[in-house]
Image (tube, rainbow, N blue to C red):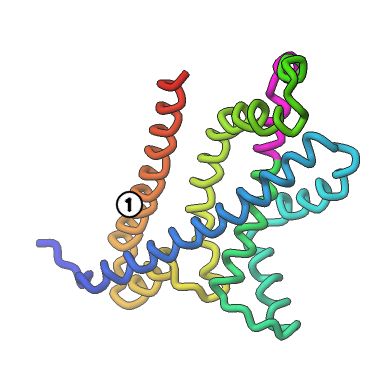
Amino acid sequence: MLSTDFSLSDLQFMLAGAWVSLQLTLWAMLIGTVSGAVFGLLRAIYPRASAPLGWLLDVFRCVPLLIQFVLFNSFNSIAGIHWTAFAIGCLVLGIYCASYCTEVIRGGVLAVPPNVVRAARSLGLSYTQTLRYIIMPMAARVSFPGWINLTLGVVKDTSLVLWIGIMELLRASQSIVTRIQEPLLVLSIAGLMYYIMSWGIARIGQRVEKGWQEND
């Protein structure tokens, strides 16, 4: 008969870690989306003037996220800033998200047909009004699937913050594995939790897209 040392308190411990993972995802996507929207517009409207910004964001896209966590955490200690590990995790993930969200938004803006923009201007709309009422709503719909995929990726990337001491879901799971020596069971439960979180986000995205389609 199968027996296990996995207890209800272990499950609660993992759920607390999952909640930390969700908080990291929320803050990272908030920082990344706001920054990415601004940067994406700049990269789409002023590609040459914003080229240095593009090169800087390329650094954050190309350097592995784990290295960024370690470097930012080390700089925090060296500079004596004394930010919490959670704040560093949110900042690094937020910048990482912004680097990708910038390209998502830029692609959405560039996908708006020039004829639509010209038609809006011919109707008397100013450039600001065209940007607000025509370009951005259309760009948002084009960019939304990519933004959802980015969010799902961030949910999994939160597991890397264990390297700077944050007790998120994966680190909580590893702590339990070390104690009860049942990696298959514990990691299966952790994988199920990651799946449930990702599934929930994907379902919300599907409902939003369906609502847009119904309002067409």
In the rendered structure, the answer to whether residue 38 lies left or right of residue 142 reads: right
Report the front residue among 178 and 70. Answer: 70
In the rendered structure, the answer to whether residue 193 lies left or right of residue 205 reads: left
- Residue drawn at (73%, 14%), measured in percent from left and top? 119
Report the front residue among 63 and 182. Answer: 63
Q: How many marks?
A: 1
* Looking at the image, residue 92 lies above or below residue 41: below
* Looking at the image, residue 144 lies above or below residue 61: above
For the stretch drawn in magenta, what is the main secondary structure? helix
Instruction: Point out the stretch of residues depicted in magenta.
Output: 103-117
Report the front residue among 26 and 197. Answer: 26
User: Outermost residue toward the left?
Assistant: 1
Residue 74 figure quarter:
bottom right
Q: Secondary structure at mark 1?
A: helix
Residue 89 location in percent, x, y?
58, 67
User: Outermost residue toward the right?
Assistant: 48
- Residue drawn at (29%, 67%), measured in percent from left and top? 182
- Residue drawn at (30%, 57%), measured in percent from left and top? 189
- Residue drawn at (46%, 62%), measured in percent from left and top? 23
Residue 123 location in percent, x, y?
72, 16
Query: Which residue lies under the disc numbered 1?
Result: 192
User: Outermost residue toward the front?
Assistant: 124
Tell me, yes or no, whether the highlighted magenta stretch contains residue 108: yes
Residue 9 location in percent, x, y?
23, 74
Q: Amino acid at mark 1?
A: Leu
Residue 204 figure quarter:
top left
